[in-house]
Amino acid sequence: MAKRRREPMSEGKKNIIAGLIQEYDIKTAEDIQDALKDLLGSTIQAILEAEMDEHLGYEPYERSENSNSRNGKKSKTIRSKYGEMEIDVPQDRESSFEPKIVRKRQKDISGIEDKIIAMYAKGLTTREISEQIEDIYGFEVSEGMVSNITNKLLPEIEEWQRRPLSSVYPIVFIDAVHFSVRDNGIIRKLAAYTILGINEEGKKEVLTIQIGENESSKYWLNVLNELKNRGVKDILVLCADGLTGIKESIAVAYPQTEYQRCIVHQVRNTLKYVADKDKKAFAADLKSIYQAPSEEAGYAQMKEVTEKWQEHYP
């Protein structure tokens, strides 16, 4: 991929940068950070003053028949990706001023909640997240605050897991994503099973995500019964790898559903017995069987592939 060329700097930008270097005596990267922090605070302050002018309909020291008027300022500490800063929020006598640039009760303008949730999703502890935020952004976020932010997700997750589903899904796929979790100081592997359906409009839809520890017929029957309770009356084809107990559970929960072993896993399992030098050619031939347009064509292709490779891999 070609490296994108930087556009030539305009004279206007050069003049602004020269002015900043002179105004803030910039010599290091930290000086640039401090300058940006100061400029951000000053810009927010100016916008707040302009918002108040628009709200009241007149500028400071102008005469007006408006019964509402300015009523001093209230100091407020806000957090940004450049660190903490103080701003003075203008007040009005009727308390009807609603600033847009920094809303009432808003103390964070850096999108820090999204960053905390992203780190939480990657498995960091509340203490590690707190330390990362302080190290990167220069202000402290308590472990309690991190917990409060991540706990906001729980009601949304629970609501998503309980939402009603369509009555029929022509195809449903079950596949696992393996990840590490810390449990009582011990790192262990878990599987998150993503159950993805193709609905009657041909669109993909994640039906649920289930964390699996002790997969069995009972486990999968509970998963499938949960889908039934959420409105799924029929699945035409359910595609999964050879999960323990899945076939028996399908027969109980959806007796008319056809169970299809995952073709990708079947090809992968077959290739375990093939030498590395032959894998590319063998995989291409094997896929030609599964990708045949009809059962008859697939059977004919299977006979050709068998004849071709029988000597090497009986």
Image (cartoon, rainbow, N blue to C red):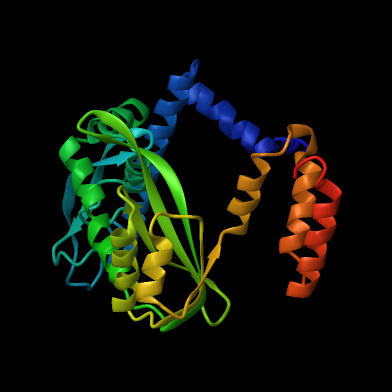
Q: Nearer the viewer, residue 4 or 130?
A: 130
Please report the residue visible at 30 percent of the width from the left and 53 percent of the height from the top. 102
Q: Is residue 201 left or right of residue 1?
A: left
Q: Residue at x 39, y 83 (%)?
A: 233
Question: Relative to 236, is 273 above or below?
Answer: above
Residue at (45% x, 48% y) in the render: 177
Q: Residue 99's quadrant in the figure? A: bottom left
User: Relative to residue 149, is residue 228 depicted above or below?
Assistant: below
Query: Residue 305: horizontal and vertical position, in percent?
Result: 81, 54
Q: Quadrant of residue 202?
A: bottom right
Q: Quadrant of the C terminus?
A: top right
Task: Note whether 243 is above or below 170 in the view shown.
Answer: above
Residue 204 versus residue 98: which sits nearer the camera? 204
* Residue 209 % position (x, y): 37, 59
In this rendering, does residue 101 appear at all? no
Q: Residue furthest top?
A: 27
Question: From the image, which quarter does the N terminus lie in?
Answer: top right
Percent x, y for residue 167?
A: 41, 84
| Residue 95, image x, y percentages | 15, 64
Is residue 219 visible in the rendered image? The answer is yes
Which is more toward the observer, 115 or 171? 171
Q: Residue at 18% across / 35% down in the picture? A: 142
